[in-house]
């Protein structure tokens, strides 16, 4: 049975992970138990292949189409969100439901709850909110005999991500190796992320996104800025130490995993939505987060104190 429901998506990896509860709920409303996905034909940036890799493994997604390939007559539910970018298809706005982007910097609504609210208010969903979901590659990526595994991610590729970098991963790697015995440091990401940081294992730009998810699933903790891998770790319920910069905390905070958010709550935070994100020259929100702070929470997580779970 082919789905009668379709959802549009074109944005980041983390955004898609946050979209998965609503997509699972939408699939549960379809007789087939699945949905189709459509994307923009002009979407060609680095994130697309990663998200296609994620889509291939999700059991509630049937097929993925380009918008121009669609047989519009076969669907009776079209789920468009504020991420819909369809200037190439004016009829989309004229004939389908479309929602303006919320003012994330002014509202305390998690992005995953925004999608669910749209589904409840405009499509009649009445069930519980499903959990965020990603299916990692099946085979272990890290040697299973390795004990304590600490993963680093410093998401900073692309026109926005560059403003999310934390500058002290080199010092953190040194501190971890000198404090903890039998601890393996691992770096993940794309392109030149963490290029100058020496870790025991280097997976940067060497894995698909679902293979990266498997590395995260095998980890004891991920230390990361606000990036797609943060939300993958959250979906997989892996402990997170998140180094918070200019993105809206209420919108992006991990909600499923044990997580410590290190956020200095400066007057200029959050700045992602007001233009300050790209014009800032100091990034004090990140540069003022110290290696000592991170090590404190890592010691707590590894049994040398109480891990301060911000989501408890």
Image (cartoon, rainbow, N blue to C red):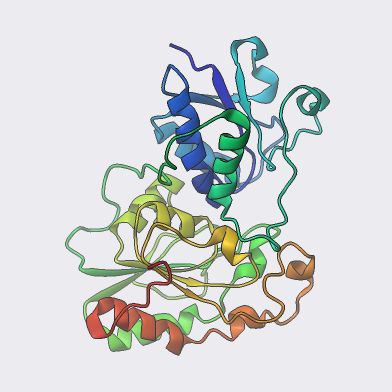
Q: Quadrant of the C terminus?
A: bottom left
Q: Position of residue 41 (x, y in %)?
A: 69, 29
Which one is nearer the viewer's eye here, 202 or 16?
16
Q: Quadrant of the N terminus?
A: top left
Q: Quadrant of residue 73?
A: top right
Q: Quadrant of residue 200?
A: bottom left
Q: Is residue 208 visible?
A: no
Q: Residue at x 41, y 34 (%)?
A: 58
Q: Is residue 21 above or below residue 142?
A: above
Q: Position of residue 250 (x, y in %)?
A: 58, 63
Q: Is residue 43 visible?
A: yes
Q: Is residue 170 above or below residue 103?
A: below
Q: Residue at x 36, y 57 (%)?
A: 216
Left or right: where 187 falls relative to 141 = right
Left or right: where 158 falls relative to 261 = right
Q: Is residue 199 above or below residue 117?
A: below
Left or right: where 248 falls relative to 140 = right
Q: Position of residue 311 (x, y in %)?
A: 42, 67
Which one is nearer the viewer's eye here, 71 or 95?
95
Q: Quadrant of residue 133?
A: top left
Q: Position of residue 23 (x, y in %)?
A: 50, 35
Q: Residue at x 50, y 17 (%)?
A: 3
Which one is nearer the viewer's eye here, 55 or 84?
84
Total label count?
A: 0
Left or right: where 249 falls relative to 269 = left
């Amino acid at each position: 049975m082919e789905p009668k429901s379709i959802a549009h998506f074109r944005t980041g990896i983390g955004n898609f992970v946050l979209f998965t509860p609503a997509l699972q709920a939408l699939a549960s409303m379809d007789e087939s138990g699945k949905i189709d996905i459509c994307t923009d034909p002009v979407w060609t940036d680095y994130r697309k292949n990663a998200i296609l890799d994620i889509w291939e493994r999700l059991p509630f997604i049937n097929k993925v189409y380009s918008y121009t390939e669609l047989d519009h007559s076969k669907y009776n539910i079209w789920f468009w969100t504020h991420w819909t970018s369809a200037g190439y298809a004016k009829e989309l706005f004229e004939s389908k439901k479309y929602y303006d982007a919320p003012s994330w910097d002014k509202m305390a609504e998690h992005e995953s709850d925004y999608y669910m609210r749209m589904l409840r208010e405009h499509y009649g969903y009445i069930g519980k909110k499903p959990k965020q979901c990603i299916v990692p590659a099946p085979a272990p990526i890290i040697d299973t005999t390795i004990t304590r595994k600490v993963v680093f991610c410093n998401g900073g590729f692309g026109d926005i991500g560059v403003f999310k970098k934390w500058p002290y991963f080199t010092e953190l790697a040194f501190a971890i190796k000198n404090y903890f015995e039998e601890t393996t440091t691992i770096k993940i990401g794309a392109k030149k992320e963490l290029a100058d940081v020496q870790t025991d294992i280097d997976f940067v730009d060497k894995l698909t996104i679902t293979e990266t998810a498997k590395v995260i699933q095998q980890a004891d903790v991920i230390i990361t800025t606000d990036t797609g891998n943060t939300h993958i770790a959250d979906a997989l319920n892996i402990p997170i130490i998140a180094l918070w910069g200019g993105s809206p905390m209420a919108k992006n905070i991990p909600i499923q995993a044990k997580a410590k958010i290190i956020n200095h709550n400066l007057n200029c935070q959050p700045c992602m939505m007001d233009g300050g994100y790209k014009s800032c020259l100091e990034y004090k929100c990140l540069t003022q987060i110290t290696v000592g702070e991170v090590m404190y929470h890592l010691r707590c997580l590894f049994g040398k104190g109480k891990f301060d779970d911000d989501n408890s």
